[in-house]
Amino acid sequence: MKEIVLRSLSGLLYVFLIIGSALFSETLFYSVIAVFSGLALLEFLRLQELNSPIPYLFLLLLWMQCVFQFLPQSVLNVLLVLVVLINCYFGINLFQLPLKSFSRKFSFLAALFYIVGSSYSISALVQIDSSFGVWPVLFVYFAIWTNNSFAYLVGRLLGKKALFPSISPKKTWEGFWGGLVFTLLLSYLIYMRQSVYSIWFFIGVGFLISVFATLGDLVQSKFKRLKAVKDSGSLIPGHGGFFDRMDSILFSAPLVYALFLFIKYVS
């Protein structure tokens, strides 16, 4: 019982810091995401047994970009492409059996783009449409929390067929479909509250978030399984570390950001 209470309180504090900072100040939100990402980066580098200041300096540079916006969009587009390619590689690599460790050079690239580059996409969602402000990024967070919560609940109640038994034995196909259905339902409810984007846009975003949030969770689980650890850290009681909490958003945010950019450029 004590563990459940502690897990609930730490989870609520995490959610409060994200939502509260986003609603209070964009700069505060960028700073909160940078701190969370820095802690996730620390855990990732420890997991991969890497010691380099370069990823932290890259994170600082991208935080400064969020605040002062001095880099041209063409450079940011190249960064986004690299992030998406690295993440897609990790997604495809899930199907490679037996599990093999990544080289130190590739782990370093993962720290730069999978962790730091993806975290920039989270903050960049705030700047994608001035008429919506912070709501695009909050939509992504709410969709991820909905997907993960209902995937867990449906999986616990109805789960029988394992999704990726070699990486995460407790995840089931039934849980995945449950998370997807409720994420699409949330997407429809959000669509009903606005008049700019079509229902198909929100359904598409909801589908992408559900799929890539699950992939992000599995990719992070693979990193931990390769190192034979249960959690990436212990900074969040009952939840593990910040890398554990950010696995889904790191995978989902770049794709959603890319989709928003595409719609913005073609419309």
Image (cartoon, rainbow, N blue to C red):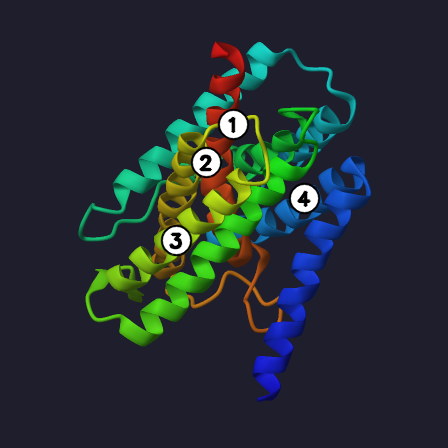
Q: Position of residue 78 (x, y in %)?
A: 50, 16
Left or right of 40? Residue 219 is left
Residue located 53% across and 54% down the image: 243
Residue type at mark 3 is Phe
User: Which label's residue is closer to the chain start, 3 or 2?
Assistant: 2
Q: CA distance from mark 3 to mark 2?
A: 31 Å
Left or right of 123? Residue 152 is left
Q: Which residue is mark 2?
A: 202
- How dense is the environment of label 3, judged by Cα within 10 Å: few (below 14), some, or many (20 and up)? many
Q: Which residue is mark 4?
A: 33
Q: Secondary structure at mark 2?
A: helix
Q: Position of residue 170 (x, y in %)?
A: 31, 69
Q: Which residue is mark 1?
A: 197
- Which of the labelled discs sits on residue 223, or is there none? 3
User: Which label's residue is closer to the chain start, 1 or 2?
Assistant: 1
Q: Position of residue 254 (x, y in %)?
A: 49, 32
Q: CA distance from mark 1 to mark 2?
A: 7 Å
Residue type at mark 1 is Tyr
Residue contact between numbered discs 4 and 1, judged by CB atoms under 8 Å: no
Q: Is residue 188 above or below residue 146?
A: above
Residue contact between numbered discs 3 and 2, judged by CB atoms under 8 Å: no
Q: Secondary structure at mark 4?
A: helix
Residue type at mark 4 is Ile
Residue located 59% across and 40% down the image: 193
